[in-house]
Amino acid sequence: MSLAAHKKSTAAMATVAAAALVASTACSAASGSEELETLNIDFATYNPLSLVILENGWLEEELADQGVEVEWTQSHGSNRANENLRAGNIDVGSTAGSAALLNRAVGADTHTILIESQPEWSAMVVGEDSSIESAEDLEGASVAATLATDPFFFFARTLDEHGISLDDVEVQNLQHADGRQALSTGEVDAWAGLDPIMASAEFDGAELIYRNVDFNTYSVINATGDFLDNHPETAQVVVDVYEQARKWAQENPEETVDILADYAGLETEVAERVLDERVDFDIDPVPGEQLRSSIEPTGPIFVDNGDVDSQEAVDEAMESLFRPEFAEDRQATDAEGSDDAADEANINQDEE
């Protein structure tokens, strides 16, 4: 995919976001006067705590007294979560911090309400017998990356650090799983990987040629402004259940590994590598300065690539992105859950 094609696709994204914002604004008064019947929320293999919550049925249990049902939709990348947030298909979605900022900067009425974890979920990946041995060798290469996600921004920052332009490589815009497949079949020379798919590729012989934890932004939970303004009590329950999951995952690492392995279709040793070596749940979950300093460096990339018209637009989005009050008021729930909760969950199958 050429850089020009990339700019065209992101311009379309901005148009869709603007339309979604108008639609959201038009219906906000009506939605505010109505009781919430269904919470639409995502789960993702790159968000292990969402899997813990889904598996145990804690959210359904906590919202039962409010008469609110829960519908789950799987996000296959930050880009898909943002698309569903903009379209109003979900109220709460999982993305990287960088993707959350981009979504707001193109006009989406979304806010970050919680930090899920600090992951090192992205790196530059090549095949087992690749002649590419370092980031410097990426010039002229064909690279798979999912636009508008942390791996793509990791890739762009990696190139910049090594004096290479995006115009000097051929970017293939593929969803994360498809990027891994393209690497394994030799259709691309390298891949901007994402865990847990990346860890699985490693066990199949792929190699990480460049890692930089500082180029990975946090895993965050976002919600639409309409949902937060009109249903703050439900939003607080979501954050409180995530707090229960965060504590539970730290106290039950083996069970958390099993849950990730099950949902992502991984061998146990692959899930262990992800959770034991590349995810940190022991963090301050309140979106604040630590998150801001992590995602601000991606802003100029948005502008340079034509994703956002100006740095001023990025800065304005940054100032209004966080809604920290929910995480500040968090109190871990004590939901008991049930063994068959996942089987009874209402899951909407989203296309990859």
Image (cartoon, rainbow, N blue to C red):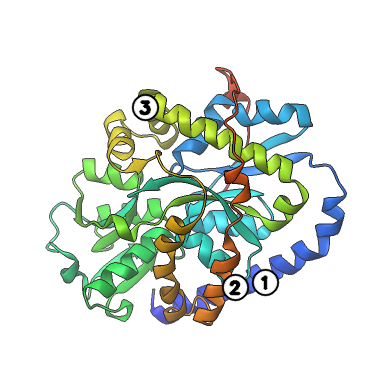
Q: Quadrant of the N terminus?
A: bottom left
The reply, left or right, for residue 205 in relation to residue 330 is left
- The residue that label 3 is drawn on is 253
Image coordinates for residue 272, horizontal then vertical, percent: 30, 33
- The residue that label 2 is drawn on is 14
Residue 293 sits above or below residue 15 on the image:
above
Q: Mark 3 or mark 2: name the one nearer the start of the chain.
A: 2
Query: Given the image, on which type of amino acid does mark 1 rest?
Result: Ala
Kindly identify the residue that appears in the image at 63 percent across and 56 percent down. Answer: 85
Query: Given the image, on which type of amino acid does mark 2 rest?
Result: Ala
Kindly identify the residue that appears in the image at 52 percent across and 82 percent down. Answer: 310
The reply, left or right, for residue 274 in relation to residue 39 is left
Query: Given the image, on which type of amino acid does mark 3 rest?
Result: Pro
Image coordinates for residue 149, horizontal then vertical, percent: 44, 60
Q: CA distance from mark 3 to mark 1?
A: 42 Å
- The residue that label 1 is drawn on is 18
Closer to the camera: disc 3 or disc 2? 3
Image coordinates for residue 171, horizontal then vertical, percent: 34, 70
> Badges 1 and 2: C-beta atoms under 8 Å apart?
yes
